[in-house]
Amino acid sequence: MVQVGLLLSDVPASVSPSQQFRDVLRIVEAAQANDFTYIAIGQHFLYGDLRWLQPVPLLARLAAEVEPHIRLVTQIMIAPLYHPVLLAEEIATLDVVTEGRLVFGVGLGYRPEEFGYLDVPFRERAARLEESLQLMQQLWTEDEVDFHGRFWTLEGVKPHLKPVQKPHPPIWIGAHSLAGARRAGRFADGYACPPETPFDEVLERYAAVKEGFEARGKTFGPQPLRRNVLVADTREQAVIEYARVAQGRYITYAQRGLDVMAGTDLEQDFAAAVAGHAVIGTPDDVTKQLTDLVTTLPVDPLLVRPQWPTMDAGETIAAIKRLGTQVVPALRAVEPRTTI
């Protein structure tokens, strides 16, 4: 059956961190009660008027709040901003604390200012990510590590901390670009396709991942796919509500350097701009669109985002319950495809 996961959202900085955490606990409880089996959270630093709780400590706490079948996902951590030894040990510890339920999702990052804050050259982020992944996998799997890279060198070090999962937690690379999909094919276990990617581009990226896997002798199978969703009583209500909760966030993404909607008019014709990827409409509309995706693409899990910074916890929980009763059962009845 296709598994369904929840993408947690950032929230306005006007919400206190303590309240944000309490809301996360309520939202995760609702997700679990409605057959969501993955909980995923992103990451940013010094984010201004919005806030993420950092994923490693948050997921460590959530591990004690959810049932043993729930998997916890860093989706995504900005790996180039870390020293790989530090990140390898943080992730190994998190895998221990989650009792082997962790998925390690990473990406390049797209905000130059974050790299400036942490004194990491933005132009080096792709090379740093690839080198980090190579070194971290050695630290997780070898008893003694020699590594001579462009950015980091280790001589005869003996790792003292390894993950529960063998050889290591599944690695997902999230990326908007075709180059990022190719990187996933070379270095990862899965490619977490972003919500804004239209169907034809998903196919293109999956083909690139499959090619990379085959070059490594790795079997290509179902991939994690992210989608933004909203269910309403009518299609018209769904369009209006999606604009209310999400339009400002799309515009902010564009302003902050993530050009996911190039060539579209997010301000004057938002509905048309998101028509190729956002899954919105009546319960039947949304069920059909998502079922079409998971029956024509090799998808598992399907990670959905029902929450936006404009929504309070009550609205988010209501959206999760509606998905859980009206959409999720149909998806869980589908056997995942294994090929493109």
Image: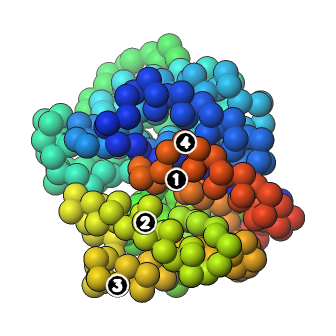
Residue 269 is tagged as 3
The quarter of the picture where residue 89 lies is top left
Q: Earlier in the sequence, mark 3 or mark 1?
A: 3
Going by the image, does 80 lie left or right of 320? left
**Spot occupied by residue 217 in the image (x, y as percentages of width and height):** 62, 60
Q: Earlier in the sequence, mark 2 or mark 1?
A: 2
Up the image or down, 213 lies above or below 276; here it is: above
Label 2 or label 1, whichever lies nearer to me, is 2
Going by the image, does 181 lie left or right of 38? left
Give the structural element (helix, strand or loop) at label 2.
helix
Instruction: Tell me which residue sits at (38%, 34%) in the image.
Output: 15
Pick the quarter of the image with the C terminus: bottom right
Disc 2 from disc 1: Cα separation? 12 Å
Up the image or down, 309 lies above or below 68; here it is: below
Disc 3 from disc 4: Cα separation? 28 Å
Q: How is the image coloured?
A: rainbow
Nearest the camera: 338 or 233? Answer: 233
Q: Earlier in the sequence, mark 3 or mark 4?
A: 3
**Spot occupied by residue 90 in the image (x, y as percentages of width and height):** 45, 24
Residue bearing mark 4: 313
Instruction: Tell me which residue sits at (69%, 44%) in the image.
Output: 31
Q: Residues within 10 Å of mark 3 (few under 14, many from 20)?
A: few
Nearest the camera: 8 or 59? Answer: 8
Q: What amino acid type is highlighted by mark number 3?
A: Asp
Q: What amino acid type is highlighted by mark number 4?
A: Ala
The reply to whether residue 88 is in sight is no
Give the structural element (helix, strand or loop) at label 4.
helix
Residue bearing mark 2: 244
**Spot occupied by residue 180 in the image (x, y as percentages of width and height):** 39, 63
Q: What amino acid type is highlighted by mark number 1?
A: Gln
Instruction: Tell me which residue sits at (78%, 64%) in the image.
Output: 326
